[in-house]
Every structure is written in C-alpha cells, then in structure tokens.
Amino acid sequence: MTRGLVLGKFLPYHLGHAHLIRSARAQVSRLTVLVCSREHDPIPGGHRYGWVRAAHPDCDVRWIDEQVPQAPEDSADFWPIWTSLIAKHAGSVNRVFTSEAYGDELARRLGAEHVCVDRARGTVPVSGSAILQDPMALWDYIAPQARPWFVRRIAFLGAESTGKSTICVRLAREFETISVPEYGRVYCEQGRPAMALVRVDFEAIAWGQAVWEDEAAAAATRVLLCDTDLHITATWSDIVIGSRPDWLTDAARARRYDLMILLDHDVPWVGDGTRVLERRRAEHTRRIRAELDRAGRRYVTVSGSFEQRTEACRRLIAGLVQR
C-alpha cells in the first residue's frame, strides 16, 4: 500500500492547497494530511483543520497543535523534531507531496519520494500570505470552506420603516452577494403580532436570527448584508415586555460585524401590516443608539431620503470591499 503525506499550515486553506491534496490523493492508497498550527496564528488551527477535513473526507486529516520550530535555523533539532512528529501522527510514508523547496530534504529524512506539485504556482497562482493581505481581491482563490471566515458582515440597524430591508436587498444584488432577512418579521408574519410577543418568542427570534446569519455566511460573496441584529432584538424585547432574556445582551455583544450602519428615522413612515411603532420611532432609535454605545460598538449613522441613505450605504460597503 502506498502511503502519502501532505503537511502545511493552510493559513488559510485555498484552492492551491486543494489542488495539492487532490493531486496527492490520486497517486496513493492512503493520504495523511497534517494541519499544523501555533498558538498565535491569525486564524485558529481548529478552524483550518475543520476546513481541510470537510473538503477532503477521503483523507486522514490530523491536527498538530504544538509549539515547534518552523525553520531549520530556529533550532538545531528542527529535523528530528519534525520527523518525530510526522512519525507520531502519520506513521511511515512512501511519498511526500509539497509545493515547497523543503520537500526534498523532508522526504529524504523520511526515506520517502518527494513529489513536487505546481512549485511555480502556475496552476493556482496564489499563496496564503497574499490572501491574508488582501482577501477581497483574491476571494476567488479562497476555498469555499474557508470563505465564511473572511466574509465581511454588515449589520443594518434602525427603527421600523427606516429602509433596512429594502436597502439590504438592493445592495446585496448590486454587490452580487446575499442578504439575511429579519427573522422576527418572518416570525410575526406566521401569526404572532409583534406587541403580543412574550419572552420565549424573543428567545426564538434571537436564536433564529443568529442561525440564519451564520448559515448565510457560507454562501456570501465578500460581504454579507444583515437586516437587523441581536441588539435590535434586545431593544424590541425591552419595548414589548419591559425586559429581555438574561443571555441576550451578551449574545448580541459577541456577534462580530465589520460595519454597523444605524439608519435614522428621518424618513416618512410606510405601513406594511406588521409595523406597529410609528409614534415611537424616535424612542426606538434612542434605545438602539444607547444599546450600541453601552456595548462599545462602532457604528455609522445614515440619514436623509431613501435614495440618499441607499447611496451612503453603497459607498460604505464599497469602501469595506476595497480595503
């Protein structure tokens, strides 16, 4: 039986790595892939291990999370340390597959054949370091499993009838990505009037909003536009029942966004059958602003007509994509 080895940081996992692993798997009976990480890597090793494992279920993917030297000049024991680690996690191998110069020496020390795959990066012209520097420009080279990590999430916040849903859908189409609807709106459309909601309803809405958002991140392209967030759910709960579930504040603050846009209430009210706080929009805006300030959130307030605020949001998103 021919046993192969691929090892790397996969920082991040990209299409060049996928090409290397697929090429190796086609040439051996069994392929072990070692995902190597260190404590202060910019992306946790567990995430990278999960990406590679999900992409290659026909391989024996293992995670090495040990503080070991990364180059021969780091330690006189570099090669003994690494050959010992490889023997521990992969056993004996016949072929070592790399796209790097170190492959010859590593294979020699393991008593294996070195198979170099696309050393010149001609098939997939990208590197992990280049992606880390500019993931938006190199988006198409990031493996699908890793893209949610790099998706830039944008939360649209505001009281009722401030344009959140309309702007989300319109700009998602323009930026060729997807938007996350407001879970609470869909929930209420199933027969639960907003002002009749109770604590368990807000718990369900918060959970549903978070799940929808995280699932959508896997299908987004560069940016994910979110129509509301858990801060809004929390303020709604305060208004309707006078309190909120104990865990909701912490859950809202734990969500990560690259841009938060607060849409002011200085536009005409448009009723749609589910909106109920026409006379309390100013109050709701104040509550949202206070909630964000207490959480230490950075946000941008956008006002003006619907077209003016749409254009302002468009510019903000474009700036985020181009950074």
Image (tube, grey):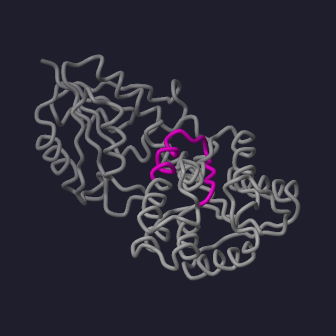
Which residue is nearer to you in this view: 159 or 23? 159
* Relative to 208, residue 96 above or below: above
Is 85 covered by the magenta stretch? Answer: no
In this picture, residue 155 sits left or right of residue 81: right
On the rendered image, what quadrant is the C terminus found in?
bottom right
Q: Position of residue 70 (x, y in %)?
A: 31, 53
**Residue drawn 16% across and 34% down?**
110
On the rendered image, what quadrant is the N terminus found in?
top left
**Residue drawn 75% across and 40% down?**
174
Q: Position of residue 104 (x, y in %)?
A: 29, 32
Which residue is nearer to you in this view: 127 or 76? 127
* Relative to 32, residue 187 above or below: below
In this picture, residue 214 sits left or right of residue 58: right
**Residue drawn 46% across and 32% down?**
16
Is 225 covered by the magenta stretch? Answer: yes
In this picture, residue 115 sits left or right of residue 271: left
Residue 316: quarter of image = bottom right
Q: How many marks?
A: 0
Residue 287: quarter of image = bottom right
- Look at the image and give the residue range highlighted in magenta: 211-228
* Relative to 311, residue 105 above or below: above
Q: Position of residue 6 (x, y in %)?
A: 28, 34
In this picture, residue 321 sits left or right of residue 34: right
Q: Position of residue 53 (x, y in %)?
A: 30, 37
